[in-house]
Amino acid sequence: MKSCLVVDDSKVIRKVARHILETLQFEVREAGDGREALDRCAEQQPDVILLDWNMPVMSGMDFLRALRQSDGGMHPKVVFCTTENGMAYIRAAIEAGADEYVMKPFDRETLESKLQIVGVA
Amino acid sequence: MNMPLQAPPLGSAAHKIVTLLEQRTGQHLDVGRAWRIDSALQPMLRERGLSSLDELVARIAAGGRCEEGLADLVVDALLNQETSFFRDAGVLDLVLTAAMDMVAEAPRRLRIWSAACSTGQEPLSLAMLFSEAQERSGLPLPEIRATDISARALARARAGRYTQFEIQRGLSIRRMMAWFEVREEYWEAKAELRYRLLFAQQNLMSDPMPSGKFDIVLCRNVLMYLSPAARSQVLNRIAGVLRPGGLLVLGAGETVIGHTEALVPSECYRGLYRLAAH
Ligand SMILES: C[S@@+](CC[C@H](N)C(=O)[O-])C[C@H]1O[C@@H](n2cnc3c(N)ncnc32)[C@H](O)[C@@H]1O
């Protein structure tokens, strides 16, 4: 079973994502901000991380940079999942080491398709 | 209580519309879908100020200049046009491999036909795949033709404009960045990509086939909607435009077996079809 860490400060989004991911047979963990997400990754690196951009305490970008420099931090595929939909944002995310990018709002097909593209679904 | 569905009664407006669809496209609506005719056509009835399917059928039957095209619109509204970028991506990789082998054997510009291309995601995926292969390995860009029966779908394919939902389905973010640009709330394929495609409206059952022979024909997720007789007809027509050594690509779960003698599974490319030897 593949594991996914959902990082988003919105409880609703986490719940929606968890529901979709569980029907796709993922084991799901959650974090409400970047700091908490780093802790979860230090416990165990997930196979894939669904990452929001704007969050309190530590943003998605800061988390991503820290993750990629940490032990085993190259393992997880990182899929940004955010309302920041401009090309400049997307480019910055890819340059910082994201593998894929989902523009909110998303549905089941979008998520499944992006997880297939990064090779975890 | 669950009532078993029955086909629309003979002579009813719904039955006449089912018949119209079958005559025009070879599509056979199963009973479940036949009952959705009403909801599928509601927007159109409203737009035209018609009160019922009966009135619509009467208008079509009356003919007359201003009703020309009305039957086409009805058919269009009933077609399933679901598609996505890089649908069954593994198959498209196989198409690229086969194309490279063909060119290695006899260097030339290949001709590819995306038959029943819907809103254009399939031919655009091919254009991206082959443009990238050209950059990587110098493979000559193939000629890519794309056809569909639906004027509405083709107009969208030509424009190459997709909603945020459509653009995220099957397309990697890197390809989206490389090949699309933002236009208002849409994502639009760059002109350099769109200009690599040649579009035309065509009914696979009855319109003339594109001229010349093709190295690769994709006809995916269309046969599944057709009656057995229509499947045979379409497959035989496609066989007629395949070059010897050419390949046919069908959708997942579709086959030529039992529908034509003219095509057989390819030994070299699993899941694709080639002309039968005579
Ligand atoms: C489900 S879509 C498949 C699109 C694409 N080939 C794919 O696999 O994603 C089926 C398409 O077939 C077209 N179609 C149905 N009957 C047809 C016919 N008789 N001739 C040409 N196109 C037809 C429809 O308009 C629709 O766009």
Image (cartoon, rainbow, N blue to C red):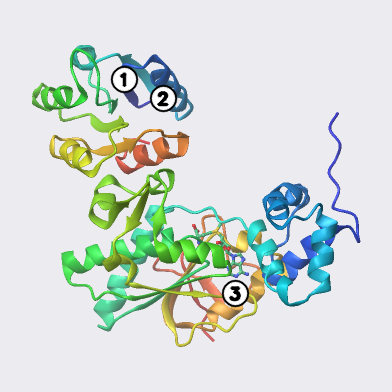
Quickly name the residue at label 3.
Answer: B204
Quickly name the residue at label 2.
Answer: A17
Residue A8 - label? 1
Mark 2 or 1, nearer chain start: 1
**Amino acid type, mark 1:** Asp
| Chain of the residue where label 1 is placed in the rendered structure | A
Disc 2 to disc 3, C-alpha distance: 41 Å
| Chain of the residue where label 2 is placed in the rendered structure | A
Q: Secondary structure at mark 2?
A: helix
Residue B167 - label? none
Report whether mark 2 lies on the same chain as mark 1: yes
Q: Quadrant of residue A28?
A: top left
Q: Residue at x 23, y 14 (%)?
A: A56
Find residue B3 and report its horizontal and vertical position in percent: 86, 36
Q: Mark 3 Cα within 10 Å, few/some/many (few <14, many 20+)?
A: many
Q: Nearer the viewer, mark 2 or mark 1?
A: 1
